[in-house]
Image (tube, rainbow, N blue to C red):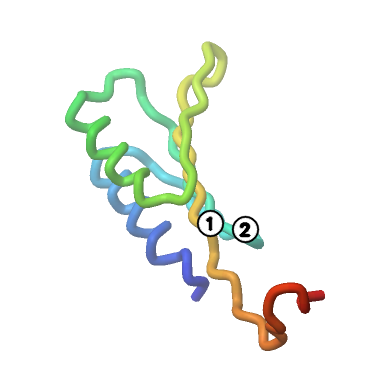
Amino acid sequence: MPASEPSAEDIAARLSAVGLTPRVEQRARFTSIEAEVPEPLSADSWREVLEAMAEADRFGLLANSLNGRTLWAAVRTATPATGDVRGPGRQR
């Protein structure tokens, strides 16, 4: 299981609890979470959404008159440590 999965799954669960339908997709360097946001969303629900999104490494909202509003977030996967660390000035 990638290191980002628990955080991404937690964010998705919190979005579901607010009534959104999140989509989670594992990518090479991050896990993405997207959800369509309905027009009537209460202030309390927005507060919950923003608190959940704050756990992500990056997030945003795409909004336009054609496609509505899509909330997105990205949670980085852990970078594996390398065994060849030589110190400053000695790295390849």
- Furthest-right residue in view? 92
Q: Quadrant of residue 22?
A: top left
Q: Quadrant of residue 46?
A: top left
Residue at the (48%, 39%) spot, across then down:
72
The circle drawn on residue 10 is none
**Callout 2 secondary element:** loop
51 or 89, nearer to the observer: 89
* Residue 68 in the image, given as x and y percentages of width and height: 48, 20
41 or 62, nearer to the observer: 62
Work out whether 81 lies above or below 60: below
81 or 19, nearer to the observer: 81
The circle drawn on residue 27 is 2
Residue at the (67%, 88%) spot, across then down:
83
| Left or right of 32 in this view: 47 | left
* Residue 29 in the image, given as x and y percentages of width and height: 62, 60
Work out whether 46 lies above or below 57: above
- Furthest-left residue in view? 44
Residue at the (54%, 20%) spot, across then down:
67
- Furthest-front residue in view? 89
Marks 1 and 2, how far apart at CA: 6 Å
| Left or right of 49 in this view: 86 | right
* Residue 54 in the image, given as x and y percentages of width and height: 35, 45
Label 2: few (<14), some (14–19) or many (≥20) C-alpha neighbours in 10 Å: few
State which quarter of the image contains the C terminus.
bottom right
- Furthest-top residue in view? 65
| Left or right of 46 in this view: 59 | right
Residue at the (31%, 37%) spot, across then down:
50
* Residue 53 in the image, given as x and y percentages of width and height: 36, 44
Amino acid type at mark 2: Arg
Amino acid type at mark 1: Thr
Which residue has dot 1 on it?
31
Tell me, yes or no, whether the two marked residues, 1 and 2, touch with CB atoms within 8 Å. yes
